[in-house]
Each structure stands twice: as structure tokens, then as C-alpha cells.
């Protein structure tokens, strides 16, 4: 048997699209699907958007993926305060939550969107994406830019 990944037998993460500002740059990270951020820091911090994704046994709810993030914490943070998740509109079911982070006296604002794509019922897996945008808490223009990036995210399953 010859199989192709991704393909109709071994499903892969659905292709996604996201709009980023022209002056942002991409960075490679072996633990994430995508990392992009501002070319220049704003008050000592580069605003950024990351995308992670994976497979999970179904059924799975977006809140279960969000709980994993909450449990693992945020490396190097002095304090982390997660807000209760709210529903996120869009093609894929999901949720959004706000996170206030303090790192070495720097106050950061983070928004996380978690989306789940479930293939037809006969498949034992679901696919998830976690989109995270981070900026300084006082950077309202940066936050608006991040919100626009996350709102532009589009993934359409091939099944």
C-alpha cells in the first residue's frame, strides 16, 4: 500500500490563510506552524502572532485545547491571568480568550483563538489551531493590528 500525507486516507491539518501587515516578518520556530511579528519593537517588545495546530482524538471541544494552554502556563511570566473564554464566530467552531501577562515588569496583552475542524464522523481524529497574538498592554494600535490578523484567519477543510 502506498499512502500520501496529507491525503484522503491520512488526513492532515486543513490549509489556512492569514493576512499579515506588509512590514511584519516571519520567523521559524520548530514548535509552531507560524510565527510572525513586527519588524521593529514597540517600547521594547515585538508584537507577534503565532499559529499552532495538531491532531486530537474526537470528539474534542475548543475549550479542551485552551485548557492545555492554561495548564502549561507561559514561559518566563511573572504572572498570567486568563479570562473566561467566549465564542468565536467563523467557519470553524472556536473560542477566544484574553490573557494578561507580566514579564519582568512589562505588562503584555494576549488574545488566543482556538478553532477545531472535525472531519466526517467515520474518522477518529479532529484537527485544531491555536492562534495567539501578543503586544504590550498599552499598545492599542498594535492590538488592533493583531485583532485584524486573527480575524482574517481562514481554514477550509478539504473533506
Image: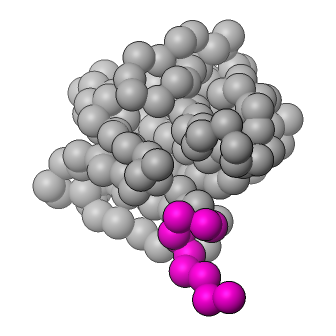
The image shows residue 108, relative to residue 48, as above or below, that is above
Query: Residue at 46% across / 38% down in the picture?
Result: 133
Image quarter hosting the N terminus: bottom right
In-image side of 119 versus 145 (left or right):
right
Q: Range of the magenta residues?
A: 1-10
Query: Residue at 47% across / 73% down in the picture?
Result: 28
Give 145 or 59, whichever is nearer the viewer. Answer: 59
Where is residue 112 drawn, in percent x and y?
55, 31
The image shows residue 99, relative to residue 85, as above or below, that is below
Total labels: the figure holds: 0
Where is residue 7 drawn, in percent x and y?
51, 69
Query: Residue at 53% across / 70% down in the picture?
Result: 6
Where is residue 5 drawn, in percent x and y?
56, 75
Residue 9 falls within the magenta-colored stretch: yes
Query: Residue at 30% across / 50% down in the picture?
Result: 17
Looking at this rendering, what residue extends furthest in the right direction?
71
Image quadrant assignment for residue 100:
top right
The image shows residue 52, relative to residue 136, as above or below, that is below
Image quadrant assignment for residue 61:
top right
Amino acid at each position: 500500500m502506498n499512502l500520501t500525507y496529507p491525503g484522503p486516507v491520512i488526513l492532515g491539518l486543513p490549509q489556512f490563510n492569514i493576512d499579515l501587515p506588509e512590514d511584519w516578518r516571519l520567523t521559524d520556530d520548530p514548535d509552531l506552524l507560524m510565527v510572525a511579528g513586527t519588524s521593529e519593537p514597540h517600547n521594547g517588545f515585538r508584537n507577534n502572532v503565532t499559529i499552532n495546530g495538531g491532531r486530537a482524538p474526537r470528539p474534542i471541544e475548543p475549550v479542551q485545547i485552551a485548557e492545555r494552554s492554561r495548564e502549561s502556563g507561559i514561559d518566563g511570566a511573572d504572572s498570567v491571568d486568563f479570562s473566561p473564554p467566549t465564542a468565536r464566530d467563523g467557519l470553524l467552531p472556536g473560542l477566544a480568550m484574553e490573557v494578561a501577562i507580566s514579564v519582568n515588569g512589562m505588562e503584555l496583552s494576549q488574545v488566543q483563538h482556538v478553532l477545531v475542524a472535525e472531519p466526517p464522523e467515520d474518522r477518529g481524529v479532529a484537527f485544531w489551531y491555536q492562534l495567539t497574538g501578543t503586544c504590550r498592554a498599552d499598545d492599542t494600535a498594535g492590538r488592533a493590528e493583531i485583532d485584524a490578523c486573527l480575524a482574517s484567519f481562514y481554514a477550509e477543510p478539504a473533506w
